[in-house]
Amino acid sequence: MNDYAERQYEGKGNNSQNEPIFKDDPPKKEHYIAAKPLVEAVNVALYLRRPLLLEGEAGCGKTRLAYSVAYELGYPLKECYIRSTSRAKDLLYTYDAVKRLYDIHEKKGKDDESLPPREEYATLGELGEAIELSQKDKPSVVLIDEIDKADIDFPNDLLLVLDRLWFTIDEAKEKGQKAPRYDALNGQERHERTHVLPLIIITSNREKELPKPFLRRCLFYYIEFPQKDKLEEIVNSHFPNRLSTETVDIAIKRFLQLRQQKQFSWRKRPSTSELLDWFLALERDEKQQGINIYQTLSTLTEGREFPHLEALVKNQSDRDKLKDLEIKNEQE
Amino acid sequence: MREYEALLYPVFDYLQRHNVPLGVSEYELALSTLRDSGIADIEHLKRFCRLVWAKSLEDQELFDTAFAEFVEYSVQVEFVKILRDVEQTDSSISTSPFDTDEETVSDGNLQQDDSTVNQTEHQSSQEHGQKSFDSETELKDSTQHTLQTDEPDKVDTKTETQESSIQWGHSHSRFHKRGGGNLYAGRDLMKFHLTPRFPLGRREMAGAWRHLRRLQRSGHPEELDVEGTIHQVCQSGFFVQPVLQPRRRNQAKLLLLIDQRGSMSPFRPLVKLLLESILRGGMLGRVAVYYFHDCPGEYLYQQRNLHEAFPCKDILLHHARENSVLIISDAGAARGNYDHQRQQQTRAFLKELHEYTYLYAWLNPVPLNRWQGTTAEVIAHFVPMYPFDREGLHDAITILRGHPFPPGVNIDVKYA
């Protein structure tokens, strides 16, 4: 008997307490510190198995959350990265009709004209695989990343699948037989099988407005930028015992000063992922070049340039505005 | 029914009326989940409902307002009342209706005795009622109330409850009607609601724009053309290579002509929302926006402040040919008078536009009943003009897709 129904998400960046479903291919460890409401949201989504739609600033850890959930629960992670040409059907399966056509012609006129079954020409997509796993009573985490990148039809086409959690491969239908069918519910009621259904996590950057019926079915959570103490926790989880407490403290202070400055509005505000990159660069300086980071940062006056600004500021206009500000401050 | 269910309904109703995409199943879902798993405290209840019911950052703000108004306020008032009553009756109970475990919530049938029938006999219906309140009670009189519990030493046997049923659903609405006398009344209701809500939300606008599409195959050939391949095999007798075709993409193009300044100034936020909805709708192949003042003349402007002028002819030639054109202007309806020159000038422009395309429509942000007797009423005879509301936008988009003009609307109509 498995314990899938009891598995809960904690979001503290600890080692996973749960046994991975596929021991030979366990999900990678993820240092992710989630705010309490977010942990609650994930657990509600787990309980209801409704898709969890995440929004938030770029770099605040929307995608990473899915990794972290998969790791902690020990579920396999199925990642669907959406492109502008993605179609909902591609997430379920692709059918290689051209290959079959070639095979037919190759065998033509030969003694053995039999072809492999049609189903062999179909390849399951990530969501398709997740549904197949569910059918075999194995839950998974499905990440549908940046859904707003796709064509406006995409979410609508996905609706039916997300609702019913089954699909058929119509192209692979053999004569006199039914088309191959994958069904996460396996003919049972939804509430009987919630614990083995895939947990679907969807991220969006709000480039496009998602259709109403799609939104209706999702749980929505907006990931806020973490508070200072949470930031410290995050940094310590990623750099355990590698940087002194004072260094972390002063660096986060400086980072927040930069982030919350009111003189101009950011085009792209530095976020958690930028902060972690910055720490990596700072740590390298300290280890390899023997620069005392604490001293550099604590003597940093507003007029002087940040070390490794390239890790924090990601576009020219922000950089220019920041430079202007520095010059102004120096003149004063 | 448990009391939080009655409390939550107004929140749900409020959100639904404000066009948050919610259905009965979402209401059911929230309640059944709460029933199964219980609520830890009111903050938890709030977070949970927000997760299930709010679908964007704006919705979340809306939710917070509704929750503060309908739930937190009621609970706070009840809580304060209980505390006071407890002090009065020297009772030591101070359980809030939303306590740390669900049992308390489900058992905490709060009723209140009516002050007018105070000091009467204790009723048998009270036997398994716990702390009870009756919603009929005036808030300001709450200090006179007595708390009842089923524990004998804390029961005030002198009081009687007229209605033993819980009336939370009604009580919350009473609370803010009578806000005045109580110390806490009205405090939370003083919050201002600063998220602009328009008669037509961006989500609906984006939904409407989805209908404006002209799918055509363009770009790289990347999709297998099954029919073409079979055809080729049949023709040559053997299979050489698959025939590919480009994907179908939305090729609809839109030219937006927006009246700016003057009488259109108050409608700026609405127009801005429309623009956003088009860009966020994301399905239009190309959108061009030009501005004018009062009526399109010889020049149209690329900037909102009527800078960067381009000859109208060039723009029509470039953007309007065979494309959809949407004009947004009050057509003089905001001022409320008839301006012959404006009418003539607009008509001249429309005639010119008609040579390039017949896919054009007009959205007028002024309501239909205000067009009467103004320039707008006359212009509406030449061009399909619709008020800027849900139906109007849909109708305008139908015209932009190529539907014929409504009867009686014609550029060549003789208007006396």
Image (cartoon, rainbow, N blue to C red):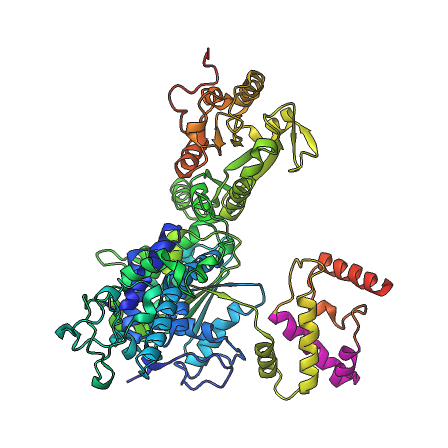
Q: Using residue A254 as the reference point, say whether residue B140 is left or right of it.
A: left
Q: In the image, residue B82 lies at what x, y percent?
A: 33, 74
The residue at the far right in this view is A331
Q: In the image, residue B338 lies at what x, y percent?
A: 52, 19
Q: Using residue A68 as the reference point, say whether residue B128 is left or right of it.
A: left
Q: Which residues are magenta?
A: A272-299
Residue at image location 47% in from the left, 47% down from the top:
B202
Q: In the image, residue A300 lies at what x, y percent?
A: 79, 75
Give the quadrant of residue B305: top right
User: Which of B173/A80 is in front?
Assistant: B173
* Main secondary structure of the magenta stretch: helix
Q: Using residue B276 as the reference point, say whether residue B183 is left or right of it.
A: left
Instruction: Check the image and report above or below for B287 versus B147.
Output: above
Verify whether residue A286 appears in magenta: yes
Verify whether residue B323 appears in magenta: no
Residue A158 makes an appearance in the image: no
User: Which of B267/B358 is in front?
Assistant: B267
Image quadrant where one finds the C terminus of chain A = bottom right
User: Which of A80/B410 is in front?
Assistant: B410
Image quadrant where one finds the N terminus of chain A = bottom left
